[in-house]
Amino acid sequence: MNLNDLTLLTVSFNNNLLTGMMIKSFFKQVGLVKVVIVDNGTSIAIGDSFKRVFTVVDNMHQKITGDYRQCSKNHCSTIDYALKHLIMTDWVLLVDNDILFKPQTKEYLKLFDCAKYDCAGEIGWDDAPPARLFPYFCLINVRKFNDAKLSYFDDNRCIGPGSKEDGPRGVNTSCWYKDTGCSFYEDIKDSWAINEIKLTSYIAHMKCTGEGNRDIAGFLKQNQMLWK
């Protein structure tokens, strides 16, 4: 893969520090690419320093995509908007902003066969089915996505009400739900060539949702070789 054909896409939610460190890590481990940030925040806007260097789209309080009043739905709809309107390269690397890249990422992207595969990522679930393509690190052929008129978000297949017959998801829930990347995977699993990978080979992931009370400083210190 030629890095000139790649855009790094992330959705930021009230945490400029993690967004900045994620991008810094990519530049250190892989190289310079186009960067698109969609600001999905509710309280802390993306700083001007980001806007001077990267493409930043203000979607504070879902002013562009509309508020579905559910975190995963808002995340899905924002990604869908970005894939359809903001990416000018043939490929996009969709990532969460709370990850850092391992050195192996550079070699993986360098050797990635764009003619053989349409998408790459890890398929699985966090604590219960159904399966999805994790949005933490997902390589997507945007040209094929748009030519096929696909959608990353389907309101009827994202965090649906489910039913008790579906079975429990976690300890205190009574139904499965379809999280970010689920409907997209359902739509491409039989027609796209997906390069399945293990994300732990390429990223360190904090799994910090929004303004969650996590030890961000500890995470960055523990993984300082990935960004410093």
Image (cartoon, rainbow, N blue to C red):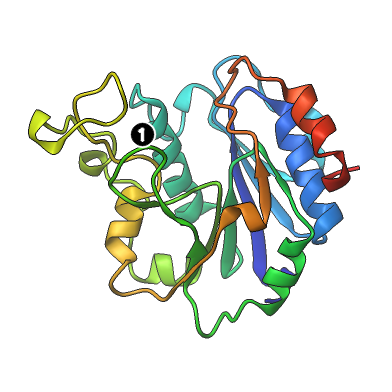
Q: Where does the image place residue 190, in percent across and percent down from the top left? A: 28, 72
As rendered, which of 120 and 44 lies closer to the eye? 120
For residue 76, above or below residue 33: above
As rendered, which of 90 and 214 lies closer to the eye? 214
For residue 183, above or below residue 32: above
The structure residue drawn at horizontal position 91% and vertical position 42%, both measured from the top left corner, is 228
Disc 1 target residue: 73
In the current view of this chain or complex, which residue is farthest to the right?
A: 228
The structure residue drawn at horizontal position 55% and vertical position 59%, both measured from the top left corner, is 198
- Which residue type carries mark 1? Lys
Place residue 48 in its image quadrant.
top right
For residue 70, above or below residue 53: above
Relative to 45, 115 lies left or right: left
Q: Is mark 1 on a helix, strand or loop?
A: helix
Relative to 171, 95 lies left or right: right
Residue 186 in view here: yes
Relative to 17, 179 lies left or right: left
